[in-house]
Structures are given as structure tokens and as C-alpha cells.
Amino acid sequence: MKKRVHAVAGTLGLTLITTFFVASVLVEVGGDHDAIASVKTLILYGICVLVPSMAITGGSGRSLMGKRRGPRILGKQKRMIAIAAIGLGVLTPCAILLQRLSAENDFGAAFTTLQAIELAGGAVNIVLMSLNLRDGLLLTGRIRRRRSSTTGVA
Ligand code: HEM
């Protein structure tokens, strides 16, 4: 049960952040200012789901870890610290400011800079969360690591 909660919360977090990223890019490329402002408001609501889901992922991951250690678990733990720091320290403030600026129809240099920072931080978190998902599936044996053809080392 705990494992299921962990996997669902982690996958939900990854799905949400990927959706925010894709929606931001698509609306920047093809949307008008009203559409951008709507997406920025929806992202703020989404963050209200993302933050608890990541807290549940971290808490349940810690509890699943118990006394187990090892490079894969340590890697997940370190990545989670970076994910939380980027999420709370960079992405959330960017999302709040971008929503405010877009609601005031201010799409100047500040908006562009914050948008670039948000996309860069979002891309890093998508990679880190995907690696945590992969390592989780490796830990539970749902997927197997492919053997290297040159060294024969797993
Ligand atoms: C974005 C963050 C994370 C995601 C997306 C994620 C995802 C997953 C997934 C999909 C599984 C496999 C569940 C299954 O096969 O039923 C898993 C297992 C696991 N995760 Fe995470 N995880 C994350 C963070 C963490 C953290 C921070 C820890 C703690 C260090 C952690 C510890 C574990 C452990 C120990 C397992 C194996 C459970 C077992 O073998 O019973 N995870 N994770």
C-alpha cells in the first residue's frame, strides 16, 4: 500500500511538472497574451497539488527506505533534495511572479527572464524526477538494467 501511494504520488508529480512545462512552451509559441495568462493561473492551481504530492513522495520514500541503504536509494535521496530546492526555491516563486505579470499584461523583459529560468529549472526537475522513477522501478524489479555489451557489467 505504501509503495503504491509512493509510486502514484511520484508519478503524479512528474506528470504535473511535465504538463506545466509543455503547456508553457506551447502557449508561448502559439498563444496570445490572454491564453498565456490563463495557463499561468492554471499552473498556480496545479502547484497546490504538486507540492503536497511531492511531500507525500518524499515522506513515503523515506519510510520505504527504512534501514536500507545503497547507491540507488542514496541517489534518489540526493535528487529529491535538489528537486525540492529547485521546486520551492525557483519554480514556485517564478510561477507566482509570472502569474502576476501576465495578469497585469506585462510581458516585458522581466517576464521573459523569469520564463526562461522557470523552463530551465523545470527541465532539470523533469530529468531528476524521471531518474528517481527509473531507479524506483529498478529497486522493485519492475524493470531491469540492460547489460553493457562491451564490459558485461550490469
Ligand atoms: C520524484 C521522486 C520519486 C519518484 C518519481 C519515485 C518513484 C518510485 C517508483 C515508481 C517506485 C516503484 C514502486 C513500485 O514498483 O511499486 C519507487 C520505489 C522506491 N522508492 Fe521512490 N520515487 C521518488 C522519490 C524517492 C525518494 C526521495 C526515496 C527515498 C530515498 C525513494 C525511495 C524508494 C524506495 C526505497 C523504493 C523501493 C520500494 C521497495 O522496494 O519496496 N523514492 N519510487
Image (cartoon, rainbow, N blue to C red):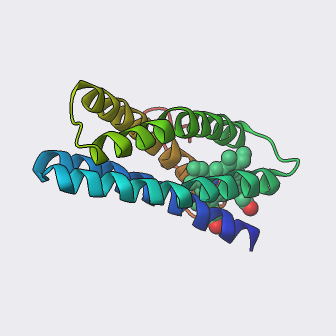
- Give 9 or 127, whichever is nearer the viewer: 9
Q: Is residue 33 left or right of residue 100?
A: left
Q: Is residue 90 above or below residue 63?
A: above
Q: Is residue 55 left or right of residue 24?
A: right
Residue 72 at x, y percent in the picture: 66, 41
- Give 54 or 93, whichever is nearer the viewer: 93
Q: Is residue 80 left or right of residue 124?
A: right
Q: Is residue 50 above or below residue 73?
A: below
Residue 147 at x, y percent in the picture: 49, 45
Instruction: Say which residue appears at 41% left-offset and 38% top-offset.
Output: 97
Most extreme residue toward the bottom is 1
Q: Quadrant of the C terminus?
A: top right
Residue 100 at x, y percent in the picture: 37, 43
Instruction: Say which residue appears at 53% left-offset and 51% top-offset.
Output: 134
Residue 108 at x, y percent in the picture: 21, 29
Q: Is residue 79 above or below residue 103?
A: above
How many numbered marks are there?
A: 0
The answer to which quarter of the image holds residue 95 is top left
Q: Quadrant of the N terminus?
A: bottom right
Most extreme residue toward the front is 104
Q: Ligand 1: give its quadrant.
A: bottom right
Q: Is residue 102 visible?
A: yes
Q: Is residue 136 visible?
A: no
The answer to which quarter of the image holds residue 104 is top left
Q: Is residue 75 left or right of residue 110?
A: right
Instruction: Say which residue appears at 83% left-offset and 47% top-offset.
Output: 68
